[in-house]
Amino acid sequence: MGKFFRKRSALRARDDQVTNATDLTLKQSLLPLALVTILFFLWGFAYGLLDVLNKHFQNTLNISRSRSSGLQAAYFGAYPIASLTYAGIVLRKFSYKATFMLGLTLYGIGALLFWPAALKRSFGGFCGATFIIGSGLGTLETAANPYLAVCGPPKYSEMRLNFAQAVQAIGTVVGPVLASHVFFKNVHDNSLQSVQWVYLGIAIFVFILAGVFYIANIPEVTDADMERQMELAGGVFTAAEGKPLKSQYHLWWAAAAQFGYVGGQETRPGTTNAQGANFLAAAQGCFAAGRFLGTFFMKFFKPRWVFLAFFTGVVIFQAVAVSARKDAGLASLNLVLFFESICFPTIFTLGIRGLGKYTKTGSTVIVGAIIGGAVIPPILGAAADHFNNTGPAMFVPLVFFVLAYSFPIAVNFYKPLAQLMDGFLESKAGEGGKEFNVDEAEAAEMEDMGIGKKGDA
């Protein structure tokens, strides 16, 4: 712990320099990964509040369901702008650490802007503030997802990201519960005062967290590290090795699947404020349980197998939800949330598999695909307004889930992709130096970074 904060790491790192951060043992990677995992809780908390705020604004500001989806459009529309522009540039030109700090700063600024938006009772102001929050979270996603996937023993890549996303899912439970017991408990529908104070508290917290990242010693994972890791993996990446980024077809397939999956995930039926918050809390509880259980299964089964099983559950129960009504419909949607749980992080880790020096760029592409969450909910909202009922409109996410389902099928039944996806499962990297030999200069550099000599337990 002392080494982690005694000497802060630089805000800029050369991507052509091997740092050996990908060679970290499980023990050495725990502290930086724990700090990054906090970011996933923040993402989940903001995400959990979004749906409840959406419904609250429908009542408070007297707007339609389709117009209220502008909140989601602002939130998720910011993701591709962030990931494909400034977040991606900072990640490639500076470091993961600098990108984390940029994301937290943007998040804090967006949270502060909720105060004047509430005072003016401006839905456009809320959308603008939400866009900046989405920019911050999109920036964090651009860095945090690949960092968790590549920092530490590569054989645990899918498990690490799914576990962190399980922590994120806890945040999605806390958000609606807080909304139910703070925003809407004994609060008149026209009140926005609670929104102001909660987001002020969020802003203060994330600015403090940005300071913690500044003083922390974050091991940097460079393009050179990823290329070296790929070379030492024993030829398991022959399906992707040596191809230019545009020819890494599994990356683009994963991005398309992420677009459809996230867009489908962002379609929720609305009820009353308190009922909606309670339903979301229960649904996100199923979501969190699914992520922890899915992570557990990945310890014993290949991640691509678990991924296929869970995505199959998504398609089946979404199809049931289209025709189910009342309690049966809500139960079906809870099961959809359960099976959705591992899909986002697993699409991500499998999508960047074997990209080597293109890992950071590939990560920005998949994060950019989150724009599906901005595109598809308005389509659902328009369908719900047309039918004056959300139930029949649930065929909209079903269509996109079916299209995204092609990716888990491909990575399991197309042999070259299946071999690529299994990737590092047999790798001994990060297991006490069994596979890597670090010379004295590299060992000294690692020790100076505060991550210990290679082979430390």
Image (cartoon, rainbow, N blue to C red):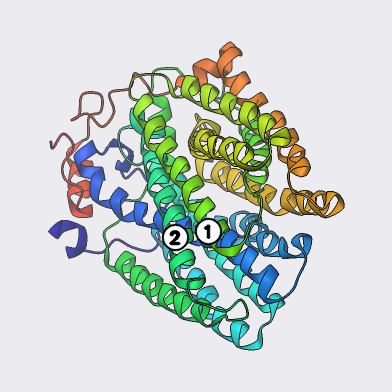
Which residue sits at x=21%, y=43%? Answer: 28
Q: Is residue 114 above or below residue 226?
A: below
Residue occupied by mark 1: 277
Residue occupied by mark 2: 177
Q: Nearer the viewer, residue 206 or 423?
A: 206
**Quick one: label 2, few (<14), some, or many (20+) residues within 10 Å?**
many
The quarter of the image holding the N terminus is bottom left
SS of the residue under disc 1:
helix
SS of the residue under disc 2:
helix
Q: Is residue 410 above or below residue 319?
A: above
Quarter of the image for residue 439 reads top left
Q: Is residue 316 above or below residue 177?
A: above
- Please indicate whether residue 197 sits to the left or right of residue 82 in the image: left
Which residue sits at x=70%, y=29%? Answer: 402
- Please indicate whether residue 222 sits to the left or right of residue 251 in the image: left
Q: Are marks 1 and 2 in contact (CB under 8 Å)?
A: yes
Which residue sits at x=64%, y=64%? Answer: 54
